[in-house]
């Protein structure tokens, strides 16, 4: 494949069954000629490898001659930033590709993977996420409260008033039946209710910022020299780098 590795990053990968496998997140070059040889495809939280030799770059991305099930069932290899020859052979055997029967010598002046110890360390990355910590709800209830209030009222009662008539008044008349009627009144308390707004209430959130310290552990590899005791007195070699 003559396509540059940078052009493949982020490309959509489609399998032979027409299904989209994922996107290219990393490209590994061949140690011999430096051409793109393998691509790590990210599908959700899973990463798998596909060979680039028989793949084709189209307008829709990268098409590989293997179906989705074959790709997702491949070896779970942790290649880091460089794929070793052993890892490449494992993937080649899985995909049925030709595997060299004899390891070719590395170009002159170039060190092979076996000549290096790779020291790695973990880096702590702190992110933030929004989570729900609780809920607060306003609910309006109706309470009944007894009220006693004094009201001044009156009512009418009747009295019989009798005034004797003297002879001097000279009131005369016929004996006959008669009647008199009066109407009695009284005041009564009349209750009337009205609804009056007295307060507005609502819930609001306020943002309170604070500093928080997170605690965790990171692992760091350490490389030390362990000299053979039989040759410990034969001399010391120069240390060209520090780990």
Image: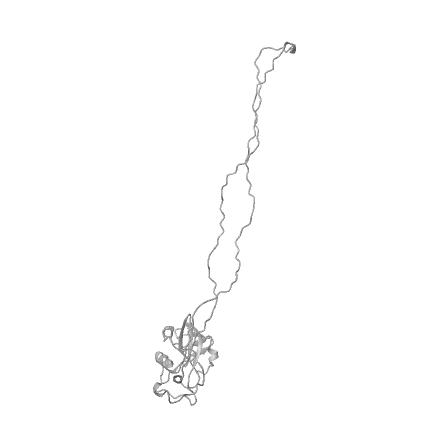
In which quadrant of the rendered image does the N terminus lie?
A: bottom left
Residue depicted at 65% across the width and 10% down the height: 168
Q: Nearer the viewer, residue 218 or 235?
A: 235
Report x, y in % for residue 241: 45, 84
Q: How is the image coloured?
A: one colour
Report x, y in % for residue 140: 50, 48
Q: Horizontally, is 107 left or right of 165 in the view?
A: left
Tell me which corner region of the image, top left, top right, bottom left or bottom right, holds residue 229: bottom left
Report x, y in % for residue 19: 41, 72
Tell me which corner region of the image, top left, top right, bottom left or bottom right, holds residue 194: top right
Of all residues, the one furthest to the top in this rendering is 167
Q: Horizontally, is 144 left or right of 95 in the view?
A: right
Of all residues, the one furthest to the front in this rendering is 233
Residue depicted at 38% across the width and 81% down the height: 88
In which quadrant of the rendered image does the C terminus lie?
A: bottom left
Report x, y in % for residue 8: 46, 78
Q: Is residue 175 above or below residue 11?
A: above
């Amino acid at each position: 494949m003559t396509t540059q590795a940078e052009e493949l990053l982020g490309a959509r990968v489609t399998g032979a069954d027409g299904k989209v496998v994922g996107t290219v997140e990393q490209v590994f070059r061949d140690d011999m000629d430096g051409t793109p040889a393998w691509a790590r495809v990210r599908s959700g939280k899973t990463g798998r490898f596909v060979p680039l030799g028989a793949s084709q770059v189209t307008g829709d991305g990268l098409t590989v001659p293997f179906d989705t099930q074959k790709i997702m069932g491949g070896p779970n290899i942790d290649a880091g930033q460089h794929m070793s020859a052993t890892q490449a052979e494992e993937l080649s055997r899985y995909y049925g590709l030709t595997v060299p029967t004899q390891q070719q010598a590395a170009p002159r002046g170039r060190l092979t993977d076996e000549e290096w110890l790779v020291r790695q360390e973990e880096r702590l990355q702190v992110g933030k996420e929004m989570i729900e910590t609780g809920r607060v709800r306003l609910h309006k209830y109706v309470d009944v409260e007894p009220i006693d209030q004094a009201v001044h009222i009156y009512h009418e009662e009747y009295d019989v008033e009798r005034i004797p008539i003297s002879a001097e008044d000279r009131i005369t008349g016929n004996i006959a039946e008669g009647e008199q009627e009066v109407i009695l009144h009284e005041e009564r308390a009349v209750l009337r209710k009205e609804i009056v707004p007295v307060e507005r209430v609502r819930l609001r959130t306020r943002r309170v910022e604070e500093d928080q310290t997170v605690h965790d552990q990171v692992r760091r590899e350490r490389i030390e020299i362990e000299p053979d005791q039989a040759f410990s007195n034969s001399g010391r070699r120069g240390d060209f780098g520090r780990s």
